[in-house]
Amino acid sequence: MKEKLEILKHKIAEAELGGGKKRIDDQHKKGKLTARERIHFLMDEGSFEELGMFVTHRTHDFGMHKEQYLGDGVITGYGTINGRMVYVYSQDFTVFGGSLSEAHATKICRIMDLAMENGAPVIGLNDSGGARIQEGVVSLGGYADIFYRNTLASGVVPQISAIMGPCAGGAVYSPAITDFIMMVENTSYMFVTGPNVVKTVTHEEVSSEDLGGAMTHAVKSGVTHFTALNEIDCINQLKKLITYIPQNCEEPAPVYAYEHRDETLKGIENIIPENPNQPYDIKEIISRVIDTDSFYEVHKNFAENIVVGFARLGGRSIGIVANQPAVLAGVLDIKASVKGARFVRFCDAFNIPLLVFEDVPGFMPGTDQEWNGIIMNGAKLLYAFCEATVPRVTVITRKAYGGAYDVMNSKHIGADMNFAWPCAEIAVMGAKGAAEIIFKKEITTAEDKEAKLKEKELEYLQKFANPYGAAARGYIDEVIKPEDTRMKLLKTFAMLQNKTVKAPKKKHGNIPL
Ligand code: HXC
């Protein structure tokens, strides 16, 4: 037995060394942790149980049978983060560049199956050169096996992808199907084809960083939801993210203790400028209303005219969707609509109530928006809100104009409660545009056209630039003092806690993609 235990000990030591000391040193020199170090920092101490430590690849081509590494370039297993079960895979760049072989893929699929069967999140730590080139189609099949499971698991258990190195070729599509992507600045990138292929096909010269680095995907494409300064920051953010979300679609998100405070928000109304055309930062309002320091913004650098993110209210998770008057006056354009829609659908899939702050002048006009499909893309946000069955509350802080009034979680599309501040303006369009259309004849025939326009503009403003027309019809449940907002929301979400809605029977809807 002693001898056999020695063999086991040696095999474990061999597996733990991955691709060897030199390659580990190279990894460190690039400012990257190894796959095992990442797991060590991510999981509760001593909680990680590794599965498939001795799995090896089965390839003989290109002399591969002479190069075997225990684990075959991915560490898989389960354990806890702050006491909650998660399933994890961590690709080991020191073994064939973390590339995906048949065996490597089977290991990932196994933990995804376990996560589905047991209802817990999957976290993937990606650091891979893509398909194992020596294996050919077998490796492609392995990717497809993962994509299939990603899709089946979507909406059942949360799936989170951290990109901590290269992520090239079809490898990007597994993260793309998962719920959240987090990229590490300067050491990670994602693209379907790298700079060399780009140069050959389109004659563009571009660096890996510009083509698919963390900030490129955070600002331009919106592919990544979060960026991290370094790997430790990334791991800490992963831990933070899962505090807001439940284990699976049948459970509520965890509830945290919070200290009761004076719930009145003295002076919050002063954030709104006297002039309705002046901007203000909606995040100032968000941070006053929610539990102290509880906002975790998603897609912070992308489509900043809409703000989305997780927060806590009375210790419970909520998802916030808010127009941002400080950027493009908070207008809804294609990117903002898609960003909002995806977040709404995640929250709805995982039982996270939605809180909307509305100050929106409408949808963005123009050929660029029309030709790129603002109709279909705006409809995504509309559809996402319409189908959401979680508790849904809206606070109109100022403008609610046009179709955007309907779209931004109005009661007509299933919101449970709509509040408005006294400065709210709820109308089909801005007063000037409205006056120019409906009083066109009176204005053009008047001798003093400018004065007539001003007069009619004022008339429209007085009639509609307030919340009382909507309140008279019950579209707005209550016009509230801004300082009471938090108190009202605490009561409202508590009242809606047991909300159940039976959606009509269907296979699945057909969101305008
Ligand atoms: C096998 C690979 C590999 C791969 C890297 N390696 N990628 N082995 N299959 N795909 C190995 C290298 O041979 C090397 O082995 C080690 O990993 C480290 O690679 P380096 O090139 O030395 O590292 P670095 O300079 O940091 O460059 C990393 C890299 C580069 C940018 C990822 O290796 C690269 O471009 N690899 C190929 C990427 C690629 O085209 N993948 C296929 C994409 S197509 P040694 O022994 O020297 O340590 C795809 C299809 C999926 O993925 C389709 C799904 C639908």
Image: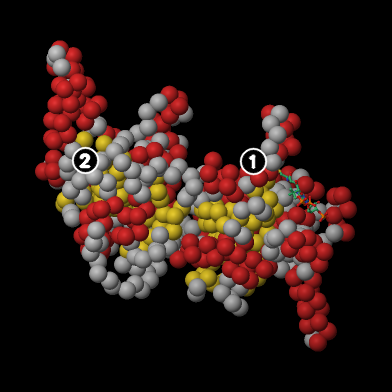
| Picture coordinates of residue 412, whole percent (x, y) | 23, 42
Q: Is residue 312 above or below residue 394?
A: below
Instruction: Residue under label 2, please give it.
Output: 425
Q: Is residue 235 above or below residue 400?
A: below
Instruction: Residue under label 1, please give it.
Output: 211
Kindly tell me whether residue 407 is visible in this rendering: no
Kindly tell me whether residue 421 is visible in this rendering: yes
| Picture coordinates of residue 184, whole percent (x, y) | 61, 55
Quadrant hosting residue 439: top left
| Image quarter (top left, top right, bottom left or bottom right) of the C terminus | top left
Residue type at the position of mark 2: Glu
Q: Residue furthest left?
A: 472
Compared across the picture, whether 359 is left or right of 431 comes to right
| Picture coordinates of residue 263, whole percent (x, y) | 25, 66
Q: Nearer the viewer, residue 21 or 263?
A: 263
Residue type at the position of mark 1: Leu
Compared across the picture, whether 140 is left or right of 260 comes to right
Q: Is the distance from the Cβ of mark 2 to the nearest ligand 1 atom less than 8 Å? A: no
